[in-house]
Image (cartoon, helix red, strand yellow):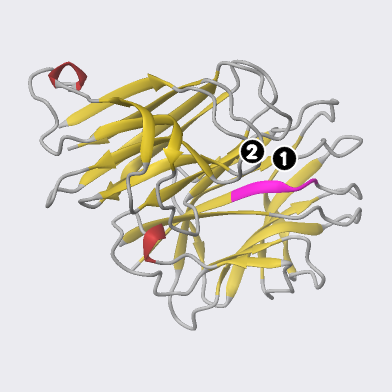
Amino acid sequence: MIYSVRAFTAVTVATVDHAIVQLWNPDATKRIKVLEVGMFKAGAGTANDSMYLARTSTIGTSATTVTPDADNAWAGDKAPSSAAVLKVAAFSVQPTLLTPPLWGWVSSAAAGAGVIWPTPRGIEIPPGAGLAMVQRQATIWPTSEVYYVFED
Amino acid sequence: MAVYSAAGRTTATAATANHAVFQFWNPDAAQRVLLLETGFYWAGAPPAGSPGFYMVRTTTIGTAAAVVTPDADNAWDRQDVPPSGATIRLGAFSVQPTLATPQLFGHTSAAVAGQNGTGYVWVFGHAPLTVPPGTGVAVVQRISNATPISEVYVVFEEN
């Protein structure tokens, strides 16, 4: 079953490798599969704002959490069985990032700049792991609209 | 068949025509690797003039400034390291890879001040681009303007 979920992040701290948002799979046995991610800046940010996609092995502590429910199911009838959640910046405790990253992007310094990365073959997230969008540089990432599409 | 992706960050290239920005290299003696998608984005001011780039096969690896080696975390099913040992070789290259002409794709861009973040993505939607054993595929600057630091990535598939 396919789900999508979005959030609006708070600004991050100006520190390298700080997470902006993370899709976390808390289940003990189930794997979920990410089919698409998207990110759009709602502030101009800084020239050469760069981010990457990395696997995570700890959840960290996020400012807010979005918990998708049955309304987020494209079939509209069942909450994600994995109980996957979107952990949204700023993080007071960073998730543990695994290297090397899976993908990267550089944004223009303009509000509304964004990117969509479809991954139709699916990036699997094992139980007790996550997939995060992370700022590469020591500059504040502005408030942003973010979303993940995943299969559970 | 498993899908992998990996990303890295180049350093600026020298202002010399036909210098590689980055290269995806298959070092295996027998295994073929299928390139599904690649992209790069400038993390610096655009090159002067009308910066152009092309994608081309390579027959020697050259000497890169840095190397990204995908591991099991880079597998989309998070199971195994790439059997081929494929890597991303990041510019600037002190020894250029050997380019196999004619090239496969090309593009050009306006060099407008403030266009940091300009990027290009190639998706091999018709069929994957096969990278035979002991060869690579590179993105190369066509003209003699330095390419800024860039965020680059590849998506590939192999047995």
- For this orientation, the residue located farthest to the left is A77
Q: Residue at x 81, y 52 (%)?
A: B12
Q: Residue at x 16, y 35 (%)?
A: A83
Q: Residue at x 70, y 28 (%)?
A: A46
The residue segment tinted magenta is B148-152
- For this orientation, the residue located farthest to the bottom is B29
Which x, y percent locates residue A55? Answer: 39, 51
Tag 1 subunit: B
The residue pinned by badge 1 equals: B42
1 or 2: tag closer to the N-terminus: 1
- For this orientation, the residue located farthest to the front is A92
Kind of residue indicated by mark 2: Tyr
**Residue B57: quadrant of the picture:** bottom right
Q: Secondary structure at mark 2?
A: strand
Q: Is residue A23 left or right of residue B47?
A: left
Q: Nearer the viewer, residue B21 or B80?
A: B80
